[in-house]
Amino acid sequence: MTERIHQRLSDSKVARWSVLALAAFTMLCGYFLTDVMAPLKPMLEEQLSWTSTEYGWFTSAYGWFNVFLFMLIIGGIVLDKMGVRFTGVASCILMIIGCSIKYYAISDAFTMEGTLFGWKARVMVAALGYALFGVGVETAGITVSKIIVRWFKGKEMALAMGLEMATARLGTALALSVTVPFAKYFGSISAPVLLCLCLLCVGLIAFLVFCVMDRKLDASTDAGGPAGEEEEPFRLRDIVSIVANRGFWLIALLCVLFYSAVFPFLKYATDLMVNKYNVDPELAGNIPAILPFGTIFLTPFFGNLYDRKGKGATIMIFGALMLIGVHSLFTLPVLNQWWFATIVMIVLGIAFSLVPSAMWPSVPKIIPEKQLGTAYALIFWVQNIGLSMVPLLIGWLLDTYCKIDNGTGKPAYDYTIPMAVFTGFGVLALLIALALRREDRIKGYGLERPNIQGDADRAGAE
């Protein structure tokens, strides 16, 4: 029996967890900017005279280039052909450029008047910057997913993905909780975006450090070894095999439905707290911030559970059920008190931890590793359709059917209809999760089996 003369660098716990820390920090910086405008919605309406529809239009820009110009799919192909280092650095640079444009658009330096493509110039320029940033952060997301598969395959992969998602959610939590106080302290609505720009530059430096370690991984891997950057060449016809896979489409649909009920909700959650639960605008972002703070602890816990015990499809079903319950409670006109909203948000945080902790580590069980970059890109592309269209839909519903007169002269809304829409997404997500478990039983993907291989399995794989 032939034994390996040396270990791969990824066999070192210190090395692979250090890589995870660097990649996760980069995503934390990206997610901070992704949600930094959500708590600012009331300030945008008061200081810059934005409407809910304009805010929804701006928020929908996140997916414009990814969805309509297929930039995310192109990014996935580039990832599979060029590798994680090239794609990750390019993604970080795109995020910095997009953030710079967004900062300029909402800063006092912006002087453009009139309209652009039928929208206020300030709104449209901010949206274009956000759209470019969206290409960078989404491509960075699939890159980090492939990095984790590359460094953690056969090891603590779901735990690693859970910790990465938890770190990214910390960026979301910070954005929701500190943005308004930060803006008021500096007396500028653009100050939090400038902070994001600085963080993104630091994130690029962190990713460059990762690149050095990833090169060492290649050097420590035998030619053609399982951790190599180029195991098999990716071919465009591989896309056909991906889209012909029923399991892939079930994962993709579950992703878009679940995330459409969470991320667009977070864009309006602070405003919901103000309008339905009468929370002070300066404190309202703290309640939605509970959701990502909860995932910081629970996503790694559920990921570790999946690694060791399995039951991935079952975990996704329970998450979808909880999602339905949460949005139903937000829809009903009961207990309009801040403490009740806090409890419901905690439950949503648990649901938000359950589904992603099992969903993302399940993709490598369905799709071959050489196609993972493109597969993740296609899933993110489908997800971006929801992330682009749903916020615009919610903004339009608020302006068209949900405006109310609260006697203060400030914009006020009844969120019953929007929350019913989010509940519907949860119901559809449950149906897809049930179909995915059935497909797993038929095809034997192993979604219900643990991720960590035993010694015998690992020896056989080598």
Image (cartoon, rainbow, N blue to C red):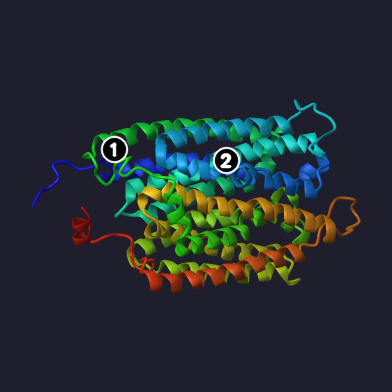
Residue 223 visible in the current orientation? yes
Q: From this view, report whether residue 360 is shown above or below residue 445.
A: above
Q: Nearer the viewer, residue 325 or 356?
A: 356
176 relative position to 380: left or right = right
Cα–Cα gap, marks 1 and 2? 27 Å
Element marked by disc 2:
helix
How packed mark 1 is, by other alpha carbons closer than 10 Å (few <14, some 14-19, many 20 or more), is many
Residue 178, disc: none
185 relative position to 156: left or right = right
Percent across and percent down for residue 460 are 19, 58
Q: Nearer the viewer, residue 206 or 338?
A: 206
Q: Which residue is mark 2?
A: 135
| Disc on the earlier residue, 1 or 2 | 2
Q: Which residue is mark 1?
A: 217
Q: From this view, report whether residue 88 is shown above or below residue 269.
A: above
126 relative position to 460: left or right = right
Percent across and percent down for residue 70 are 58, 44
Q: Residue at the left extreme?
A: 1
Q: Name which residue type carries label 2.
A: Val
Residue found at x 67% / y 70%: 329
How packed mark 2 is, by other alpha carbons closer than 10 Å (few <14, some 14-19, many 20 or more), is many
The picture quadrant where one finds residue 314 is bottom left
Percent across and percent down for residue 320 are 55, 68
Residue found at x 32% / y 40%: 230
Q: Name which residue type carries label 1.
A: Leu
Element marked by disc 1:
helix
Q: From this view, report whether residue 67 is shown above or below residue 418.
A: above
Q: Nearer the viewer, mark 1 or mark 2?
A: 2
The picture quadrant where one finds residue 34 is top right
Percent across and percent down for residue 424 are 66, 68
Residue 138 visible in the current orientation? no
